[in-house]
Image (tube, rainbow, N blue to C red):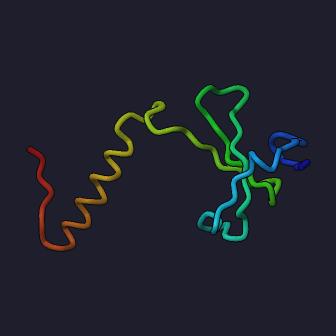
Amino acid sequence: MNVMTSRFGPLEISEQDSIQLTEGPVGFRNCTKFVLLADQKVEGLYWLQSLESPELAFALVPPGEGLENYHLMCVVAIARHWLWKRGRNLRFS
């Protein structure tokens, strides 16, 4: 399939490479078809390009790529908040 994008110009995408979501991302619920593209200039950067909306693309970085411990800190912060709301504390050994 041929797709026009605002960032990458025209692209030819095989149906096999397209990603179909059951529900689009928050704020973009109507966009459910995407393709994952590697950035041509920045190693480790990827784009989740919408196949339905040419101007919609999300920049993605794999966990651990320049964001060491980011995921862990996020999980710890959520757990602390969840426990605090229930009158408990989160402790590490």
Between 45 and 32, which is closer to the camera in this rendering?
Answer: 32
Residue depicted at x 68% and y 34%: 38
- Residue 30 position in % (x across, y down): 72, 70
Most distant residue in the left direction: 93
Residue depicted at x 38% and y 42%: 70
- Residue 19 position in % (x across, y down): 69, 53
Specify the quadrant that holds the C terminus: top left
Residue depicted at x 59% and y 67%: 26
- Residue 87 position in % (x across, y down): 13, 72
Counting labels gives 0
Is residue 68 rendered to the left or right of residue 41? Answer: left
Most distant residue in the front direction: 16
| Image quadrant where residue 53 sits | bottom right
- Residue 83 position in % (x across, y down): 19, 66
Residue depicted at x 12% and y 61%: 89
Is residue 66 rendered to the left or right of residue 56? Answer: left
